[in-house]
Amino acid sequence: MTPAVFAGAYIVDIIIGDPRRLLHPVVIIGRFISFSEGLIRRSSLIDKRKGGIILWFSVVIPVYFITLGIAEGSFFINSLFGMIISILLASLTLAARSLYDESRAVIDALNGGDIVEARRNLSMIVGRDTEDLNEKEILRAVIETVSENLSDGIIAPMFYLAIGGVPLAMAYKAVNTLDSMVGYKNDRYRDIGAFSAKMDDMLNLIPARLTGIIVVATSFILRLNWRDSWKIMRRDGGNHSSPNSGIPEAAVSGALGIQLGGEVQYFGEITCKPTIGDRIKEMNKKDVKKAWVIMFASSALMTFACITALWMIR
């Protein structure tokens, strides 16, 4: 991975985002996961928990080597062509622009007075039930999603892009996609998705904590409440069912002076999550805008850090 490719990938993602008219690699990975899961479920010879391990390796390893082959093959054709392909592939592992666009669609619907459309748009980016959410619950869901995906969709791919290039970053996306598709703790996925969930937790241990530190630093730069960002991250970062997702959520909640977590409904069942942060004030639409600013500023700071590290290594 070169500083030029990394910078190019970040710029392409910020300006263009995910190409909606083209088949995204994550969509292809998702279809392959569904196909492989179906084969394992239909087999009476494979224990579902062991089948989950087979599923993980049968997806992640091919994604790594196929991406490696495409990247190396493009450079074999021409160095400039190889750089362009690498930039495009790397940009597809990042999700800053798409996260902004998709969460912005929710807020635009609220601004237009269409809460039904806001709920529908929100359902595209969260796993919780959205049909009965009020405006405050929608705002909370958007901020939680932006905060959590700042790690999963931006900082973590950048981390793996910097240390292992495009193949490792794309393999991470496969791991993340597996977790989002089969990593549930319900009757259907508890066995077959257990390994995928554990591997996703493991690979996000460092990026999630790095994200928290970056959010604190970004809050300082933006003159937000960086002291509370640090305090709440350390105090409430573990108040989540995931060992990682609570870290960035706590850092953002502290910076904004709002409280996240609480009652959420999944598949018709209400779950009471621990709260994250102190309710210094009631959250509003301005807090969503501040969360977007934190997201973009944090991604820029991480990009600068990675480019600097890659330049120094070279």
Image (tube, rainbow, N blue to C red):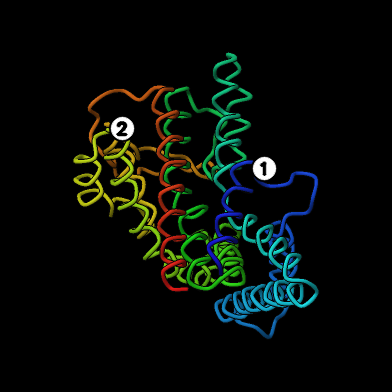
In this image, 223 relative to 111: left or right? Answer: left
The secondary structure type at the circle numbered 1 is loop
Residue annotated with mark 1: 16
Q: Quadrant of residue 304?
A: bottom left
Q: Say which residue appears at 33% left-offset and 58% top-offset.
A: 209
Residue 12 image point, x, y percent: 64, 48
Residue at point 61% right, 79% down?
Answer: 57
Kindly report the distance in space between the C-alpha atoms of the residues bearing marks 1 and 2: 28 Å
As drawn, the label of residue 256 is 2
Looking at this view, name the residue that lies furthest to the bottom: 45
Between 305 and 160, the one lying in front of the other is 305
User: Which residue is pictured at 44% across the width and 22% down the height?
Assistant: 285
**x 43%, y 39%: residue:** 264
Q: Nearer the viewer, mark 1 or mark 2?
A: 1
Q: Amino acid at mark 1?
A: Ile
User: In front: 189, or 297?
Assistant: 297
For mark 2, give the secondary structure: helix
What crowding class fits label 1: few (fewer than 14 Cα within 10 Å), some (14-19), or many (20 or more)? Answer: few
Within 10 Å of the Cα at label 2, are there few (<14), some (14-19), or many (20+) other Cα atoms?
Answer: many
